[in-house]
Image (tube, grey):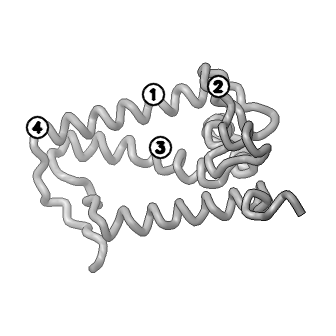
Amino acid sequence: MSPSFETNAKLSPRQRLALVLVAVVIVLLLITAARLEPDASGYGTHKQLGLSDCFVLRQWGERCPSCGMTTAWSRLLRGDLRGAVAANAGGVLLAVGAIAAVPWLLASAARGEWCYLRPSASVVLPAVAVLALVVLLDWMRHTGLTLLLDHTT
């Protein structure tokens, strides 16, 4: 099945409102990330929001796959692509996707139909698979797979 590039799928008023609300939430997340000071360690920026330390980091002393995502967003939105990728490459992909999604969602809501690309399983699933692979490879880069190895030997 090929990606759906149809734009003629009419959106109901409720769907259009949902698209606007999702775009607003994304913008608020982007603004929040831009206002945070990236943690020098490459992760932990989220603690400025009153959130706790990462459970995996606290429990096993190793980063989890999402460690560094907030830092990546904050660095990317400050124009520091290298620092963002160093913090979490998957976070960079998510941030870029979020930035691209806002005008697409708002334009689709305004037109009352999907602009250019209608979300479908044949579009969303490969994108999620690529993101998951990047997050996994990035996590392996940061941890050296130490969480998967026996620490007792």
- Quarter of the image where the N terminus is located: bottom left
Label whose residue precedes the other's in the sequence (4 or 1)? 4
Spot the residue most to the front.
152
If you read the primary sequence from the N terminus, does the residue marked by circle 1 or circle 3 appear first?
1
- What residue do we see at 66% from left, 22% from top? 48
User: The residue under label 3 is which amino acid type?
Assistant: Ile
Residue 18: horizontal and vertical position, in percent?
23, 37
Marks 2 and 1: CB-CB under 8 Å? no
Which residue type carries mark 2? Leu
In percent of the image, x 62 and y 43: which residue is there? Answer: 69
Tell me the number on the disc at residue 13: 4
- Mark 2, Cα crowd under 10 Å, few <14 / some 14-19 / many 20+, is many
146 or 19: nearer the viewer: 146
Front: mark 1 or 3: 1
What distance separates the C-alpha of mark 4 from that of mark 1?
A: 23 Å
With 114 as the anchor, is 73 left or right in this view? right
- Mark closest to the chain's N terminus, 3 or 4: 4
In the displayed structure, does residue 66 sit left or right of residue 8? right
Label of residue 99 in the image? 3
State the SS at label 1.
Answer: helix
The residue beneath circle 2 is 36
Residue 33 quadrant = top right
Secondary structure at badge 2 equals: loop
